[in-house]
Amino acid sequence: MATPLETVIAAARDLLGERLSTNATLREHHSHGQDTQPPHLPDAVAFVETTAEVARILALCHTHGVPVVPWGAGTSLEGHVTPVRGGITLDLSRMTRILATSQEDMDCRVEAGVTRDQLNTHLRDAGLFFPVDPGTAACTLGGMCATRASGTNAVRYGTMRENVLGLTVVLADGRVIRTGGRVRKSSTGYDLTRLFIGSEGTLGVITEVGLRLHGIPEAISSATCQFDDLRAAVETVITVMQSGIPVARIEFLDEVQIAASIAYSKLTGLEAKPTLFFEFHGTEASVAEQAAQAEAIARDYGAHGFRWATDPAERAKLWQARHDALWAALALKPGYQGLTTDSIVPISALAEAVLGTKADIAASGVTAAVVGHVGDGNFHTVILVPPGPEGLAQAWELDKKIVARALALGGSCSGEHGVGLGKREFLEQEHGAEALAVMRSIKQTLDPRGVMNPGKMFLN
Ligand SMILES: Cc1cc2nc3c(=O)[nH]c(=O)nc-3n(C[C@H](O)[C@H](O)[C@H](O)COP(=O)(O)OP(=O)(O)OC[C@H]3O[C@@H](n4cnc5c(N)ncnc54)[C@H](O)[C@@H]3O)c2cc1C
C-alpha cells in the first residue's frame, strides 16, 4: 500500500506532470536557504503556476498529513525554507505575472513569485516604484510578505507591513481567501492581511499580493561621510532621526564592513572608518534642505569627507555596494560562512546596543562586521564562521549576547529577517508566554494538522 507521502507525490505528479520533481539536484537546491542551519532534503519539489494548483496540493498535504514548505527564492537567512520534516517544497518562483497596475490609485496586484526588481522595471515608465528593498534582488514579493521584510528604504517608506494592501492566501486545507482590498484604510474585521505578513509559510500560502506604490521622487541625493569615532557616527543617526528629517535611507557601516566593501565593490575615496550612507528624496528644494540639515548635524559630531552623489550611476554603485555588504564581508575570509544577527532597538538605545555589540565582538575574538538600517534602530552583525562545529557554536554564543542586550533595551531579536529556525528560542522572552500561547492557538486553528512549514517559528 502506498504511504501518505507516495500518495501525495503521485497525485501531485498527475496534476503538475514534470513540474513535480524528485530530481536530486533540485531537491538539494531546495534543502536550505542562505543560512548556517543544517540542510534537509524535501522529498519532492512542486513548481506551481496557479492559485488553483496551490490549493489542490495543500488540500492533498492536509488530507494525508504531509509537510509542505513554501519557497520563493530561498534567500531567507534563518533556516526558514529548510524542510526539516521532509515533504513537499512548493516553489512559487514561476508565478510571475503582474496582474494589474493603477497609476491613478498608485497600487498594483502581482503573483507571489514576482521579484521586486521585476516589479520596479515594470513600473518605471509609469513614474512609480515599490520601495521595500531587501539586500538581494532575487527575493520574491510572496517571500517578502512571509518574512515581513524591509530594507534600506524602510525608514521613510515602511516595511512590507505598511506597503501590502491585500493578499490572496491558500489556507492549509486548500480553501482560498482574499484579505484586505485596495483602499488605504478600512476598519472592518480582524486584520487578516497583517496576520499573514510575517507568518513565514506556517499558516498558508500567499499566491497574490496587492501593493501600495509610490511616485519616483523628483530629486534624489545620496551622500557618504566618515567618522574617527564609532559613537559619533551612531549619535549622528540618533540626532538626525530625533530632528524629524525625513531621510529616505541612513545606513551605518563599521570600519570592518566599509573596508570589506571598499575592496569588494571597488569604492573609492573612503577609508576604513565608521561610515554613514545617506539618501534624501523630494523636490530639488526639499532635498537640498534635508541634506544641509543632516550634514550640519554630522559635522557637529566630527564627520568628515562628505561626498555627494546626485548622478544616478554613482548613486546606484553606492547602494549596490550596500546591498552587497554580506558578500563583501564573506570575501574577507574565504571558506567561512556568515551568521547574520538582526537585532533592533528603540532609536534612543542605538548607541548602547552598537557599542555593546562591538565590545562583545572584541571579547569573543571572532571577525565580524556591523552594518545596518540604523535609522530604524536595526543593525546586523555579520559573524564570520570558520568551518567546523566549534566556530559555529562560538558564533551562536555571540548572537545570543547581542539578542539579550537588544531585548533588555526594549528591542526585538529580529527587525526584518524573521524567526525561522534560528530565532525560535528568543520568542517567548520577547513576547511573553501568554502571547506565544495565542500565536500557537492561531497556528492550531489555521493548520490543525501541523503540515505548513513545520518546525519553524515555535520550538517543538
Ligand atoms: C545578501 C542578502 C541580503 C538581505 N538583506 C535583507 C534586508 O535588507 N532586509 C530583509 O528584510 N531581508 C534581507 N534578506 C533576507 C531575504 O532576502 C528576505 O527574507 C526575503 O524576504 C526572502 O524572500 P524569498 O522570496 O527568498 O523567500 P524564501 O527564502 O523562499 O522564503 C522565506 C519564508 O517565507 C515563506 N514563503 C515564501 N514564499 C511564500 C509564499 N508565497 N507564501 C507563504 N510563505 C512563503 C517560506 O516558507 C519561508 O518561511 C537578505 C538576504 C540576503 C541573502
Image (cartoon, rainbow, N blue to C red):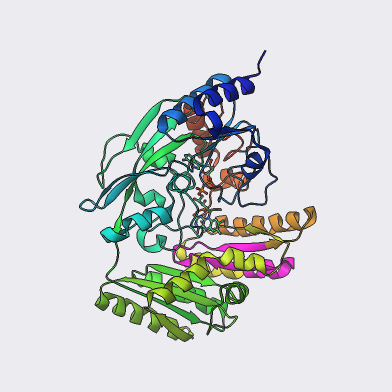
Image quadrant assignment for residue 245? bottom left
Q: Is 335 in front, or is 77?
A: 335
Residue 304 vs 436, above or below: the answer is: below
What segment carries the magenta color? 358-383
In the displayed image of the protein, which residue is found farthest to the front?
18
Does residue 66 lie above or below 261 as drawn?
Answer: above
Point 41% across, 28% down: residue: 52
Does 281 sit left or right of 153 as displayed?
left
Question: In which quadrant will I find the C terminus?
Answer: top right
Is residue 380 on the magenta stretch? yes
Query: Considering the image in quadrants, where does the N terminus appear?
Result: top right
Residue 74, relative to residue 387: is it above or below? Answer: above
**x then y, percent, for residue 346:** 47, 61
The answer, for residue 107, to whether it is visible in the render is yes
**Residue 387 percent coordinates (x, y):** 77, 57
Residue at 41% x, 32% y: name it: 51
Residue 41 appears in the rendering:
no
Let me know if residue 77 is in the magenta part.
no
Tell me what residue is drawn at x 38 percent, y 74 percent: 312
Q: In screen coordinates, is 110 left or right of 347?
A: left
**Image spot of residue 333 (x, y percent):** 71, 67
